[in-house]
Image (cartoon, rainbow, N blue to C red):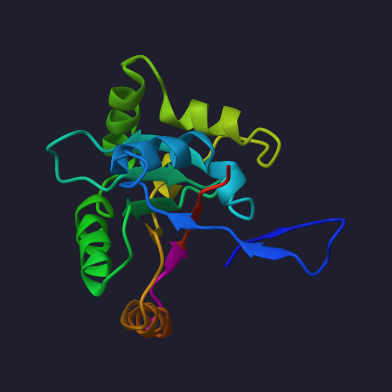
């Protein structure tokens, strides 16, 4: 819960109403745009390089990003509360895109940037120039995957399912968010 505090009257604490993307007229693509353009702000512990966003009517995760070590982060975003099916959906994307080699990732990146001359290896090195000394060897791209489900709240069954998969060695996280109406 988020509260509005009154500096002069400490006994005056008012809850701020939460809202949803649907209530403010936004769609899931709006959430995708916000996260992809501000990914380092939302995930400061994992500096990430966005390489692709979902295309309409394609079976693709919402956002694909790489960390400095070439680990592929696969994001599935929902503008509503989570359920267990979200886990199955992101795992299905992992099954498909986790097998992509460097060249397939590079094609995704070129498509995302609309520039067939780009080298994913060089762009990655540029993005992480403060963290790595040399470009990453192409065999190190997409060796591991991190699954991330972003939802407007999370239910107990989803938390338990994620805990189970983590105990089995799967790299998976759920990032719940809440929207609040201010003013």
Across the whole image, how many numbered discs are drawn on residues?
0
Quarter holding the C terminus is: top right
Tell me where residue 77 appears, x and y as whole percent: 33, 52
Furthest-left residue in this view: 57
Q: Nearer the viewer, residue 27 or 174?
A: 27
Q: Nearer the viewer, residue 78 or 134?
A: 78
Is 93 covered by the magenta stretch? no
Tell me where residue 12 appears, x and y as whole percent: 75, 65
User: In the rendered image of this protein, does residue 110 appear above or below residue 176?
Assistant: above
Residue occupying image coordinates x 35% and y 43%: 63
Quarter holding the N terminus is: bottom right
Q: Which residues are magenta?
A: 168-175
Tell me where residue 97 appears, x and y as whole percent: 25, 50
Tell me where residue 141 appears, x and y as whole percent: 42, 46
Furthest-right residue in this view: 8
Residue occupying image coordinates x 46% and y 42%: 35
Q: Nearer the viewer, residue 146 or 125?
A: 146
* 71 relative to 41 in the view: left or right: left
User: In the rendered image of this protein, does residue 119 appear above or below residue 100?
Assistant: above
Q: Nearer the viewer, residue 139 or 76?
A: 76
Residue occupying image coordinates x 35% and y 30%: 109
Residue 54 occupies quadrant = top left
């Amino acid at each position: 819960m988020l509260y509005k505090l009154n500096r002069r009257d400490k006994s005056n604490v008012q809850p701020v109403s939460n809202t949803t993307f649907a209530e403010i007229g936004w769609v899931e693509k709006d959430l995708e745009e916000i996260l992809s353009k501000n990914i380092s702000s939302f995930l400061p512990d994992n500096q990430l390089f966005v390489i692709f966003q979902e295309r309409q009517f394609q079976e693709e995760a919402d956002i694909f990003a790489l960390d400095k070590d070439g680990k592929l982060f696969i994001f599935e975003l929902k503008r509503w509360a989570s359920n267990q099916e979200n886990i199955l959906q992101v795992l299905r994307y992992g099954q498909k895109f986790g097998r992509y080699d460097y060249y397939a990732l590079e094609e995704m990146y070129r498509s995302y940037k609309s520039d067939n001359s780009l080298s994913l290896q060089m762009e990655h090195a540029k993005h992480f120039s403060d963290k790595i000394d040399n470009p990453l060897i192409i065999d190190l791209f997409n060796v591991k995957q991190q699954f991330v489900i972003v939802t407007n709240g999370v239910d107990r069954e989803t938390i338990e399912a994620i805990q189970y998969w983590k105990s089995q060695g799967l790299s998976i996280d759920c990032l719940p968010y809440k929207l609040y109406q201010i003013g």
